[in-house]
Image (spheres, rainbow, N blue to C red):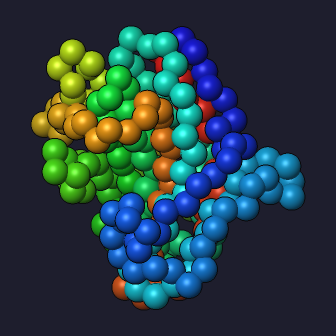
Amino acid sequence: MITDSNIQSGMWGTHLPNDGSKIGGNVPAKYGVVSPLPSGAGALIYIEGPAYSDFEAYIVRPVLPNTGSLAITFSLATDANAPKVAQAIETDTILTANGWTYNLSAQINYEEEGMIQVADVTGKWVDTGVKIGLLDPATVTRFSVLYGFDEAKHTSSVRHVMAGPTIHEIPEALQNIPAVQKGWADGAIMQVQLDTNARGGEFSVSVDGCSYVWH
Protein backbone atom coordinates (compact mmCIF):
# COMPACT_ATOMS: atom_id res chain seq x y z
CA MET A 1 0.00 0.00 0.00
CA ILE A 2 1.34 3.45 -0.98
CA THR A 3 -0.28 6.68 0.24
CA ASP A 4 -0.03 9.94 -1.69
CA SER A 5 -0.97 12.45 1.02
CA ASN A 6 -2.08 16.09 1.28
CA ILE A 7 -3.11 16.30 -2.34
CA GLN A 8 -5.11 19.46 -1.64
CA SER A 9 -1.84 21.32 -0.97
CA GLY A 10 -0.73 20.98 -4.59
CA MET A 11 -1.22 23.24 -7.59
CA TRP A 12 -4.88 23.45 -8.59
CA GLY A 13 -6.03 23.89 -12.17
CA THR A 14 -9.49 24.99 -13.30
CA HIS A 15 -11.95 24.12 -16.06
CA LEU A 16 -15.00 26.07 -17.26
CA PRO A 17 -17.84 25.24 -19.67
CA ASN A 18 -16.39 27.42 -22.45
CA ASP A 19 -12.77 26.23 -22.39
CA GLY A 20 -13.07 23.05 -24.43
CA SER A 21 -13.02 20.72 -21.41
CA LYS A 22 -16.57 19.49 -22.16
CA ILE A 23 -18.00 20.67 -18.86
CA GLY A 24 -21.70 21.35 -19.27
CA GLY A 25 -23.71 24.25 -17.93
CA ASN A 26 -23.17 28.00 -17.81
CA VAL A 27 -20.04 30.00 -17.06
CA PRO A 28 -20.09 31.29 -13.47
CA ALA A 29 -19.64 34.95 -12.63
CA LYS A 30 -17.07 34.13 -9.96
CA TYR A 31 -15.15 30.98 -9.16
CA GLY A 32 -11.83 29.85 -7.77
CA VAL A 33 -9.73 27.99 -5.27
CA VAL A 34 -8.18 29.44 -2.12
CA SER A 35 -5.24 27.26 -1.12
CA PRO A 36 -3.83 27.19 1.39
CA LEU A 37 -6.45 28.68 3.66
CA PRO A 38 -5.38 31.29 6.23
CA SER A 39 -5.48 28.53 8.83
CA GLY A 40 -2.73 26.79 6.84
CA ALA A 41 -4.79 23.68 6.08
CA GLY A 42 -7.22 22.68 3.39
CA ALA A 43 -8.55 24.38 0.28
CA LEU A 44 -11.72 26.38 -0.33
CA ILE A 45 -13.48 25.95 -3.68
CA TYR A 46 -16.22 28.43 -4.52
CA ILE A 47 -18.69 29.34 -7.26
CA GLU A 48 -21.15 32.16 -7.90
CA GLY A 49 -23.35 32.44 -10.94
CA PRO A 50 -26.70 32.07 -12.65
CA ALA A 51 -28.75 28.90 -12.83
CA TYR A 52 -26.79 25.77 -13.75
CA SER A 53 -23.34 27.32 -13.55
CA ASP A 54 -20.46 24.84 -13.41
CA PHE A 55 -16.84 25.04 -12.33
CA GLU A 56 -14.22 22.34 -11.90
CA ALA A 57 -11.02 22.44 -9.88
CA TYR A 58 -8.46 19.67 -10.28
CA ILE A 59 -5.04 18.39 -9.27
CA VAL A 60 -2.97 15.87 -11.23
CA ARG A 61 -1.04 13.22 -9.31
CA PRO A 62 1.23 10.38 -10.54
CA VAL A 63 0.15 6.79 -10.99
CA LEU A 64 1.99 4.81 -8.30
CA PRO A 65 2.66 1.05 -8.15
CA ASN A 66 -0.58 -0.82 -7.62
CA THR A 67 -2.54 -4.03 -8.07
CA GLY A 68 -5.58 -2.39 -9.65
CA SER A 69 -7.09 -1.03 -6.45
CA LEU A 70 -7.20 2.66 -5.56
CA ALA A 71 -8.98 4.70 -2.91
CA ILE A 72 -9.36 8.41 -2.33
CA THR A 73 -9.97 9.80 1.15
CA PHE A 74 -10.87 13.39 1.99
CA SER A 75 -12.78 15.60 4.39
CA LEU A 76 -15.53 17.78 2.95
CA ALA A 77 -17.57 20.61 4.44
CA THR A 78 -20.01 22.96 2.72
CA ASP A 79 -21.08 26.47 3.58
CA ALA A 80 -24.62 27.32 4.69
CA ASN A 81 -25.68 28.23 1.13
CA ALA A 82 -25.05 24.81 -0.37
CA PRO A 83 -28.39 23.20 0.64
CA LYS A 84 -30.21 26.06 -1.12
CA VAL A 85 -27.95 26.68 -4.12
CA ALA A 86 -26.13 23.45 -5.03
CA GLN A 87 -27.33 21.19 -7.84
CA ALA A 88 -24.49 18.73 -7.28
CA ILE A 89 -21.07 18.37 -5.70
CA GLU A 90 -18.73 16.17 -7.74
CA THR A 91 -15.66 14.42 -6.33
CA ASP A 92 -14.15 12.56 -9.26
CA THR A 93 -11.04 10.65 -10.16
CA ILE A 94 -10.04 10.41 -13.80
CA LEU A 95 -7.27 7.84 -14.09
CA THR A 96 -5.05 7.33 -17.12
CA ALA A 97 -2.71 4.34 -16.92
CA ASN A 98 -0.65 2.99 -19.81
CA GLY A 99 -2.67 5.02 -22.28
CA TRP A 100 -6.13 3.95 -21.08
CA THR A 101 -8.43 6.44 -19.33
CA TYR A 102 -10.81 5.23 -16.63
CA ASN A 103 -13.77 7.38 -15.56
CA LEU A 104 -14.09 7.02 -11.79
CA SER A 105 -16.60 9.81 -11.27
CA ALA A 106 -19.08 10.13 -8.42
CA GLN A 107 -21.23 12.97 -7.18
CA ILE A 108 -23.78 13.95 -4.55
CA ASN A 109 -26.92 15.14 -6.33
CA TYR A 110 -28.50 17.75 -4.08
CA GLU A 111 -31.64 17.95 -6.21
CA GLU A 112 -32.25 14.27 -5.46
CA GLU A 113 -31.85 14.53 -1.68
CA GLY A 114 -28.19 13.59 -1.66
CA MET A 115 -28.36 10.76 -4.19
CA ILE A 116 -24.96 9.24 -4.97
CA GLN A 117 -24.52 9.07 -8.72
CA VAL A 118 -21.75 7.49 -10.80
CA ALA A 119 -20.87 7.75 -14.49
CA ASP A 120 -22.14 5.08 -16.87
CA VAL A 121 -20.51 3.77 -20.04
CA THR A 122 -21.53 6.92 -21.94
CA GLY A 123 -20.26 9.25 -19.22
CA LYS A 124 -23.78 10.21 -18.12
CA TRP A 125 -24.80 10.30 -14.46
CA VAL A 126 -26.89 7.42 -13.16
CA ASP A 127 -28.54 6.99 -9.77
CA THR A 128 -27.03 4.33 -7.50
CA GLY A 129 -30.12 4.13 -5.29
CA VAL A 130 -28.03 5.33 -2.34
CA LYS A 131 -29.10 8.59 -0.71
CA ILE A 132 -26.84 10.09 1.96
CA GLY A 133 -28.90 13.25 2.33
CA LEU A 134 -27.62 16.82 2.15
CA LEU A 135 -24.43 17.46 4.07
CA ASP A 136 -24.81 19.40 7.30
CA PRO A 137 -22.97 22.70 6.77
CA ALA A 138 -21.92 22.67 10.43
CA THR A 139 -20.24 19.27 10.10
CA VAL A 140 -17.05 18.05 8.44
CA THR A 141 -17.73 14.71 6.75
CA ARG A 142 -14.95 12.22 6.09
CA PHE A 143 -15.25 10.37 2.78
CA SER A 144 -13.47 7.35 1.35
CA VAL A 145 -14.21 6.12 -2.17
CA LEU A 146 -12.89 2.74 -3.26
CA TYR A 147 -12.13 2.14 -6.94
CA GLY A 148 -11.04 -0.89 -8.90
CA PHE A 149 -9.53 -1.04 -12.39
CA ASP A 150 -8.48 -3.96 -14.55
CA GLU A 151 -5.64 -3.17 -16.97
CA ALA A 152 -6.11 -6.46 -18.82
CA LYS A 153 -9.85 -6.01 -19.46
CA HIS A 154 -9.63 -2.17 -19.51
CA THR A 155 -12.59 -1.71 -17.17
CA SER A 156 -13.05 0.20 -13.92
CA SER A 157 -15.52 0.48 -11.07
CA VAL A 158 -16.55 2.75 -8.23
CA ARG A 159 -16.94 -0.02 -5.66
CA HIS A 160 -18.19 1.84 -2.60
CA VAL A 161 -18.57 5.28 -1.09
CA MET A 162 -17.95 5.66 2.63
CA ALA A 163 -19.54 8.80 4.10
CA GLY A 164 -18.75 9.20 7.78
CA PRO A 165 -18.91 5.75 9.37
CA THR A 166 -21.25 4.23 6.77
CA ILE A 167 -20.11 2.25 3.72
CA HIS A 168 -22.48 2.43 0.75
CA GLU A 169 -21.92 -0.32 -1.82
CA ILE A 170 -22.36 0.59 -5.49
CA PRO A 171 -24.58 -1.88 -7.39
CA GLU A 172 -22.73 -4.45 -9.49
CA ALA A 173 -24.68 -3.37 -12.59
CA LEU A 174 -23.01 0.06 -12.42
CA GLN A 175 -19.48 -1.32 -12.26
CA ASN A 176 -16.97 -2.55 -14.87
CA ILE A 177 -17.18 0.53 -17.08
CA PRO A 178 -15.01 0.28 -20.23
CA ALA A 179 -11.95 2.53 -20.43
CA VAL A 180 -11.14 4.63 -23.50
CA GLN A 181 -7.98 5.81 -25.19
CA LYS A 182 -7.85 9.62 -25.24
CA GLY A 183 -4.14 10.09 -25.83
CA TRP A 184 -3.71 11.61 -22.37
CA ALA A 185 -0.55 11.36 -20.30
CA ASP A 186 -0.69 8.93 -17.39
CA GLY A 187 -1.92 10.40 -14.14
CA ALA A 188 -4.62 10.36 -11.47
CA ILE A 189 -6.70 13.53 -11.61
CA MET A 190 -8.64 14.51 -8.50
CA GLN A 191 -11.56 16.74 -9.52
CA VAL A 192 -14.00 18.76 -7.44
CA GLN A 193 -16.81 20.26 -9.50
CA LEU A 194 -19.51 22.57 -8.19
CA ASP A 195 -22.85 23.02 -9.97
CA THR A 196 -25.51 25.58 -9.08
CA ASN A 197 -29.18 24.68 -9.31
CA ALA A 198 -32.12 26.41 -11.03
CA ARG A 199 -32.00 29.22 -8.48
CA GLY A 200 -28.38 30.13 -9.07
CA GLY A 201 -26.35 31.93 -6.42
CA GLU A 202 -23.14 31.20 -4.58
CA PHE A 203 -21.78 28.42 -2.40
CA SER A 204 -18.46 26.87 -1.45
CA VAL A 205 -16.92 23.68 -0.15
CA SER A 206 -13.73 23.12 1.78
CA VAL A 207 -11.60 20.00 1.34
CA ASP A 208 -8.77 18.76 3.49
CA GLY A 209 -6.82 15.59 4.21
CA CYS A 210 -7.01 14.40 0.60
CA SER A 211 -5.03 11.24 -0.13
CA TYR A 212 -4.80 8.63 -2.82
CA VAL A 213 -4.14 5.16 -1.43
CA TRP A 214 -2.74 2.71 -3.99
CA HIS A 215 -3.13 -1.00 -3.24
53 to 110, vertically: above or below: below
Q: How many marks on residues?
A: 0
180 or 48, which lies in front?
Answer: 180
Which residue corresponds to the image point at 56% horizontal and 84% vertical from the top-left? Answer: 29
Which residue sits furthest left?
173
The quadrant of the rendering that contains the N terminus is top right
172 to 20, vertically: above or below: above
Q: Position of residue 149 (x, y in %)?
A: 30, 24
Q: Position of residue 161 (x, y in %)?
A: 40, 38
Q: Quadrant of residue 43?
A: bottom right
Q: Is residue 206 visible?
A: yes
Q: Image check: 100 left or right of 121? A: right
Q: Position of residue 109 (x, y in %)?
A: 36, 62
Q: Position of residue 106 (x, y in %)?
A: 36, 48
20 to 188, vertically: above or below: below
Q: Is residue 87 visible?
A: no
192 to 188, vertically: above or below: below
Q: Image check: 29 left or right of 43? A: left
115 or 101, which lies in front?
Answer: 101
Which residue corresponds to the image point at 49% horizontal and 24% vertical from the top-left? Answer: 63
Which residue corresponds to the image point at 33% horizontal and 63% vertical from the top-left? Answer: 22
